[in-house]
Image (spheres, rainbow, N blue to C red):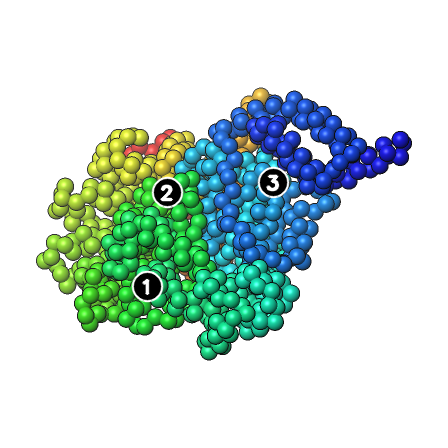
């Protein structure tokens, strides 16, 4: 009897080791609201699977019942607590969206074991675990990830497949996941991601598959060692108990994220033979070996061959198989191309429109071709494909035929998720290589027309962002290598809509400009101008394209190039002086020239261009959008402010406000945002004058509008936050100085607390700005340097003197590289660096840097510019001669009084 009981408990221990993961899943499902029955069922599945019987069964079932009863009592409070988490709504975990698991998947045991060891180790702390599978296209990376995910479904609380072909596409899928699990909507994508990461932290045992990760510029050697962790980190959950599986063609740069990445290559002969046996249903090993060797055991080629043999009903032992091998040997040397060509020939003979669909998709992105978009805009497609699409049932049969031949994939069921199509990149390349010049013209332009028809007409509107994000991969695909030529027969491509491509380029550029991705926007506008220069469209459109190029160069601080491009646009306008259609473009050119000259400190000339633009708007009156007129007044005010004429600047801002009305938070959204811009500018003037209370009030109000309307990751929102942080830093320093002067201990304590609060708030505002602008550092270093200036001063206020010096030196280096050693932007940095050096005990160094700043300011901005106020005040602190110090403070006071005019405060 004792032996029997001992054996029973030994069996229990073995069973418990086998099913412990299933119990864990049952616990988690109970905690998220799943019934106790599901937990019991999961455990019993393990028992049945192991065919337990006898005393082992009795003891084990008793343990299960006790465990379930205890879990029910413990799990209910956890479920209630989870349902009340901040930022989420009570909603079931979404079902997995995994691709169908191939019933022919075989082998890969070593690779699967490595995934298991990395993602689900038996020992070690639980936490976020990452594994990377890399290899060339067509070796089966996604198939391996799919097999792993399906095999572990019961052990994960959430499984989600994410398309990572671009950072923007990946972000869309993450935001969609947040919506599905009930994350509360927010304008800011950063806020939504933060809430998603919090949800994943609180709900353990998830699996996220980042499929086909591609990162812009990831293989550029001039940037030093590739580090994909840094590039991908913002889109990875930072913590939590879960698994991340990445598939990619990028070989290097993963060690920081995954020390042991899995490299996937072609099948070895044993696995390849097993695959062919399963795919063809044949055991004629010698013949199958011959096929595999001929195709180099390339998984994609083997899948294509197997699909062809199945669809053509070829017997491996028949003569038809020998004929298939002979035809393969006569094809291209590329193993994939051999199988593609025969499959395409066969399906094209049966259904010509199927090959047409593949031709169209070969010019689109390889994933996420929306079925709804194809049907909604099918009128722009060539007739043969459009006629098939008029019969939705016939079109569905056509797609399924391609899926059966492994030439296309289909995702989504049309009910819970939209239907999308995909085509392997290697298939795309092969399809395009077979096209004649006439066919390339037809199908590349059909793809352009399709995406142009679907792309929002107003890409700069917030409500268009989701649609634009979804379509941008297709925009990049259709504009990468379009065929563009005049048609001889007048039936195809350009003859139908010759401006489709340039319209799409302009809209894509406008969207990227709206997102403040200026380098990307510049590329689109440059291609638009090139095509319009060849005679596509009117000269007015060409002038607009040159103006758009000028704006991007201006925003990237390429002032010489910006001025040249703006000159081209203005020259086209001058050639049509009597044409009213060119007047609006002329006004915009004058405004842009004013901005360029303002950056060059040529304020008189800049004001002249803005006055010319204002005259054009005044002549037109209410015939044009009043917002353009108001923006011109605002830009004139910016010139006055930079020139030190603050009263004139405020007059311009007042006139701009009168033009759009004082609707507060109501009215057109565009006007609401513009009024917030004016409050921002008024706040900056108040800061220059030293009126920090007014500056804080105006900038806080502006920041709230920008956060609400544009989102926290918006560039303009970041700019407002940067100025507000600097105001709070100055107020914190003022409180610190006042606390040192007072002898009242209670007053001293209050002032120190206020200083600490101001500096903490400034730090809170500045950190996200640094993160945002840091991503754009390589292309927009000047905007990053402006943020470094604020950070350096904040570090000084926080007592971090050496860090402040390093930060400000970095900003100075950026400005010297971008603008030269005598630009006033460098002088602004030196005016901040001087007092930091003084506080660090380097009096001589401080005076030297402040003298350099004084020289640059006087030479470039004049002797009475407001920027000199701080320079003279800090020089006075460095001066050892009391008379000299008094003289410097008198200069600063004189300039400061001039900022207020007659209403200067006492």
Q: In terms of depth relative to the viewer, which is nearer, 872 or 532?
A: 532
Q: Position of residue 18 (x, y in %)?
A: 72, 41
Residue on which disc 3 sits: 154
Residue on which disc 2 sits: 895
- In the figure, is residue 158 to the left or right of 423? right
Q: In terms of depth relative to the viewer, which is nearer, 224 or 303?
A: 303
- In the figure, is residue 107 to the left or right of 474? right
- In the figure, is residue 167 to the left or right of 747? left
Q: Are marks 1 and 3 in contact (CB under 8 Å)?
A: no
Q: Position of residue 794 (x, y in %)?
A: 52, 41
Q: CA distance from mark 1 to mark 3?
A: 43 Å
Residue on which disc 1 sits: 352
Q: Position of residue 379 (x, y in %)?
A: 24, 54
Total labels drawn: 3
Q: CA distance from mark 1 to mark 2?
A: 80 Å
Mark 1 or mark 2: whose residue is earlier in sequence: 1
């Amino acid at each position: 009897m004792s032996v029997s009981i001992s054996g029973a408990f030994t069996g229990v221990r073995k069973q418990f080791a086998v099913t412990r993961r299933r119990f864990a899943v049952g616990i988690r499902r109970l905690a998220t609201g799943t019934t106790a029955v599901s937990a019991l069922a999961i455990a019993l599945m393990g028992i049945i699977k192991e065919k337990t019987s006898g005393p082992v069964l009795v003891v084990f079932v008793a343990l299960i019942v006790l465990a379930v009863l205890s879990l029910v009592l413990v799990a209910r409070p956890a479920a209630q607590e989870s349902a009340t988490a901040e930022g989420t709504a009570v909603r079931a975990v979404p079902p997995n969206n995994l691709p169908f698991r191939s019933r022919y998947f075989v082998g890969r045991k070593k690779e699967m074991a490595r995934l298991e060891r990395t993602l689900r180790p038996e020992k070690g702390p639980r936490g976020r675990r990452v594994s990377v599978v890399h290899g060339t296209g067509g070796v089966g990376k996604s198939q391996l990830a799919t097999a792993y995910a399906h095999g572990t479904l019961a052990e994960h609380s959430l499984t989600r497949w994410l398309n990572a072909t671009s950072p923007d596409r990946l972000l869309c899928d993450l935001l969609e996941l947040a919506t599905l699990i009930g994350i509360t909507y927010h304008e800011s994508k950063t806020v939504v991601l933060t809430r998603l990461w919090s949800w994943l932290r609180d709900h353990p045992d998830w699996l996220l598959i980042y499929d086909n990760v591609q990162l812009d510029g990831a293989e550029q050697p001039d940037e030093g060692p590739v580090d994909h962790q840094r590039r991908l980190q913002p889109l990875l959950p930072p913590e939590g108990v879960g698994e991340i599986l990445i598939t990619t063609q990028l070989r290097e740069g993963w060690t920081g994220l995954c020390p042991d990445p899995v490299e996937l290559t072609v099948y070895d002969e044993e696995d390849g033979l097993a695959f062919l046996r399963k795919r063809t249903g044949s055991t004629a090993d010698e013949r199958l070996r011959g096929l595999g060797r001929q195709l180099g055991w390339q998984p994609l080629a083997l899948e294509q061959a197997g699909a062809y043999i199945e669809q053509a009903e070829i017997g491996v032992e028949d003569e038809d198989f020998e004929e298939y091998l002979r035809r393969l040997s006569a094809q291209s040397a590329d193993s994939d191309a051999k199988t593609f060509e025969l499959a395409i020939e066969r399906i094209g003979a049966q259904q010509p429109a199927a090959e047409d669909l593949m031709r169209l998709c070969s010019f689109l992105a390889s994933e996420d071709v929306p079925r709804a978009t194809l049907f909604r805009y099918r009128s722009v497609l060539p007739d043969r494909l459009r006629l098939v699409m008029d019969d939705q049932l016939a079109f569905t049969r056509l797609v399924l035929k391609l899926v059966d031949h492994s030439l296309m994939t289909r995702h989504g069921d049309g009910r819970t998720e939209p239907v999308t199509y995909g085509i392997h990149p290697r298939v795309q390349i092969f399809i395009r290589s077979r096209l004649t010049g006439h066919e390339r013209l037809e199908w590349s332009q059909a793809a352009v027309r399709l995406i142009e028809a679907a792309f929002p007409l107003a890409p700069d509107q917030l409500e268009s962002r989701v649609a634009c994000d979804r379509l941008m991969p297709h925009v990049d695909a259709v504009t990468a290598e379009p065929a563009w030529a005049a048609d001889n027969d007048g039936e195809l491509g350009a003859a139908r809509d010759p401006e489709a491509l340039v319209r799409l380029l302009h809209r894509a550029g406008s969207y990227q400009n709206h997102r403040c991705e200026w380098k990307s926007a510049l590329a689109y506008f440059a291609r638009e101008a090139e095509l319009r220069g060849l005679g596509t469209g009117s000269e007015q459109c060409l002038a607009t394209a040159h103006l758009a190029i000028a704006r991007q160069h201006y925003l990237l601080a390429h002032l010489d190039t910006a001025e040249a491009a703006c000159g081209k646009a203005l020259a086209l306008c001058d050639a049509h002086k009597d044409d009213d259609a060119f007047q609006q473009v002329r006004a915009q050119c004058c405004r842009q020239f004013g901005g360029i000259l303002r950056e060059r400190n040529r304020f008189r000339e800049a004001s002249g261009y803005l006055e010319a633009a204002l005259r054009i708007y005044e002549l037109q009156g209410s015939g044009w959008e009043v917002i353009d007129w108001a923006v011109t007044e605002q830009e004139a005010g910016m010139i006055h402010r930079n020139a030190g004429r603050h009263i004139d600047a405020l007059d311009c801002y007042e006139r701009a406000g009168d033009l759009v009305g004082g609707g507060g938070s109501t009215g057109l959204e565009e006007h609401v945002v513009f009024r917030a811009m004016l409050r921002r500018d008024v706040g900056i003037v108040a800061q220059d004058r030293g009126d920090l209370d007014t500056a804080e009030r105006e900038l806080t109000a502006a920041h709230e509008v920008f956060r609400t309307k544009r989102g926290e990751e918006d560039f303009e929102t970041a700019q407002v936050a940067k100025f507000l942080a600097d105001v709070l830093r100055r107020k914190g320093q003022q409180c610190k100085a006042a606390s040192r002067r007072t002898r009242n201990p209670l007053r001293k304590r209050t002032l120190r607390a206020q200083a600490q609060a101001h500096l903490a708030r400034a730090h809170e505002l500045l950190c996200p700005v640094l993160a945002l602008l840091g991503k754009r550092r390589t292309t927009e270093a000047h905007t990053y340097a402006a943020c470094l200036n604020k950070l350096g001063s904040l570090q000084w206020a926080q007592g971090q003197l050496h860090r402040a010096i390093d930060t400000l030196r970095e900003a100075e280096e950026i400005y010297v590289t971008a603008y030269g050693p005598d630009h006033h932007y460098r002088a602004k940095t030196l005016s901040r660096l001087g007092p930091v050096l003084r506080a660090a005990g380097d009096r001589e160094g401080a005076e030297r840097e402040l003298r350099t700043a004084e020289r640059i300011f006087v030479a470039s901005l004049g002797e009475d510019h407001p920027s000199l106020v701080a320079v003279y005040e800090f020089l006075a602190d460095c001066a050892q001669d009391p008379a000299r110090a008094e003289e410097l403070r008198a200069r600063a006071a004189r300039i400061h009084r001039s900022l207020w005019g007659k209403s200067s405060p006492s």
